[in-house]
Image: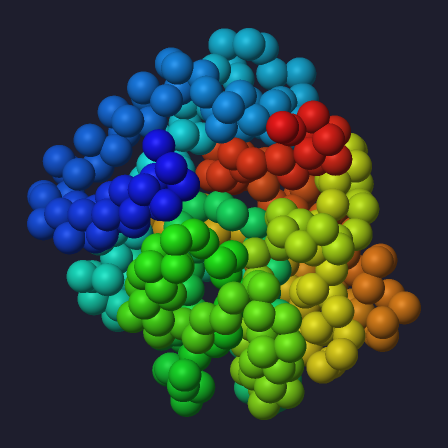
Amino acid sequence: MTGGLRGRLVDAGYAAGWRLVRALPAPVAGAAFRLGADLAARRRGPGARRLRATLARVVPGAAPAELDALVRAGLRSYARYWCEAFRLPALDPVAVHARMDPHVVGAGPFLEALDEGRGVVFALPHSGNWDAAGVWLVETLRGRGHEPAFTTVVERLRPASLYERFVAYRESLGFEVVAVDEGTVAHRALTRRLRAGGVACLVADRDLTGTGIEVSLFGEPARLPAGPARLAALTGALLLPAYPRFTADGWALEFGAPVPVAGRAEVGKATQELADAFTALIPAAPADWHALQPVFVADREAAP
């Protein structure tokens, strides 16, 4: 199968997902996605094996049976994200905010910065339903007079039609979206937002550009993007780690303590402190960290 044909088929699959999954009753859709996750766990493909290796670091000393259960729970969590992503545009954002808000922990420094007119950089891993967390943020900001709400950076997918579909999806939720490979355009959008006292949300557990900083994460070398700390140093924004995760029937969001960045010389130190924050936040719900791609240096070097 050629790359172009494969890309068109993938795009068609996502298009069908957004069209069909939201039309199914929620219990039926959820059961179907859980079944797919359980099949993936039994097949132990590359993603499941990578997730297992990562969870073994998060839960050191876990017995093989415990790791098996964690991998299955992790794949179910990832499947739940996709099921909800296909359904989220049809949900009432005010209702999403109301379900999530009681499970938001540590938001005080964020709200204080917002009221002071200071920009905020959220740094978070791929976990839980980060799009639902974005809806919570949009509604929180709207309630305080900030609109459009916040800026985020995404990886440019192929084919272009698939990337455009994901941009349209997140823009429909109220996000301002720029591509990571747009360089100067992305940088200007982020700094403009922060200097105006707004919010930037950056997924910060994978070094997509190859220019990240080596840190210790769960006691092992990993490379995390320097962008969150650099933006905070450049604009004076508050740098705040966050961990979205699931509850039984909704979503939660926990913030870590603010990470100080006095200037560019402290970017490396601040990036290590973000890694420390992730090391502290993720074990509360390890299965909700969707680490199906290499994060640690050893895994990146071993990956084909």
Quarter assignment of residue 43: top left
Q: Position of residue 272 (x, y in %)?
A: 79, 51
- Image quadrant assignment for residue 259: bottom right
Residue 269 position within the rendered picture, expressed as x and y whole percent measured from the top left: 85, 58
One can see residue 286 in this view: yes
The residue sitting at 41% across, 41% down in the picture is 3
The residue closer to the viewer here, 201 or 59, is: 201
The C terminus: image quadrant: top right
- Judged from this view, the residue extending furthest toward the top is 64
Depth check: 128 or 108 in front? Answer: 128
Please tell me how many numbered marks the rendered image carries.
0
Residue 50's place in the image compared with 284, above or below, is: above
Residue at (48%, 51%) from the top-left corner? 244
Q: For the point 85% across and 74% down, which residue is it?
A: 263
Rendered view: 127 above or below 101: above
Task: Please say if 50 is above or below 138.
Answer: above
In screen coordinates, is 283 left or right of 174? right
Q: Which of 250 and 160 lies nearest the eye of the viewer?
A: 160
- How far across and down, in percent of the image, does residue 285 sit? 50, 37
